[in-house]
Amino acid sequence: MGENMDKKFFECKVCKDIHYGKNWPNPCPTCLTKNSYIEIKVEDAFKKLEK
Ligand SMILES: [Zn+2]
């Protein structure tokens, strides 16, 4: 298993920013809210990114 398998999608519940990685940024680099990220499903992330 490679390290890339650990990566997940996260969404900022405040500004709806999508982040992909092992951990979410804290605070959010866009809206600067602390602890604002929640983990989301891969298919949900792709739906949001397509918009
Ligand atoms: Zn944000």
Image: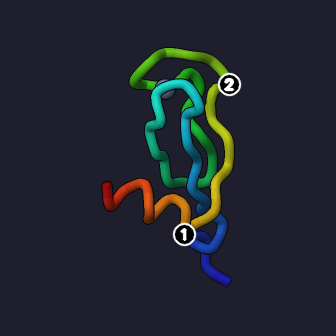
- Amino acid at dot 2: Asn
Is the CB–ligand 1 distance for label 1 below 8 Å? no
Q: Position of residue 33 (x, y in %)?
A: 56, 16
At x 63%, y 62%, the residue is 41
Q: How is the image coloured?
A: rainbow
User: Picture coordinates of residue 50 (x, y %)?
Assistant: 32, 61
Q: Going from the N terminus, do you reach mark 2 or mark 1 first?
A: 2
Vertical order, 50 against 18 (above or below): below
Residue of label 1 = 43
Checking the image for residue 8, the label placed there is none
- At x 57%, y 67%, the residue is 42
Which of these two is toward me, 51 or 46?
51
Callout 1 amino acid: Glu
| Residue drawn where x is 49% and y is 15% of the image | 32
CB at disc 2 and ligand 1 closer than 8 Å: no
Location of the N terminus (image quadrant): bottom right
Left or right placement of residue 28 versus residue 50 in this view: right
Question: Which residue is at the front of the view, 15 or 23?
Answer: 15
Gap in angstroms between the C-alphas marked 2 and 1 = 23 Å
Q: Are marks 2 and 1 in contact (CB under 8 Å)?
A: no
**Where 3 falls versus 1 (above or below)?**
above
Q: Which residue is mark 2?
A: 35
Q: Residue 5, image x and y in percent?
A: 62, 74
**Depth order, front residue of 25/45:** 45
Q: Residue at x 37, y 56 (%)?
A: 49
Callout 2: helix, strand or loop?
A: loop
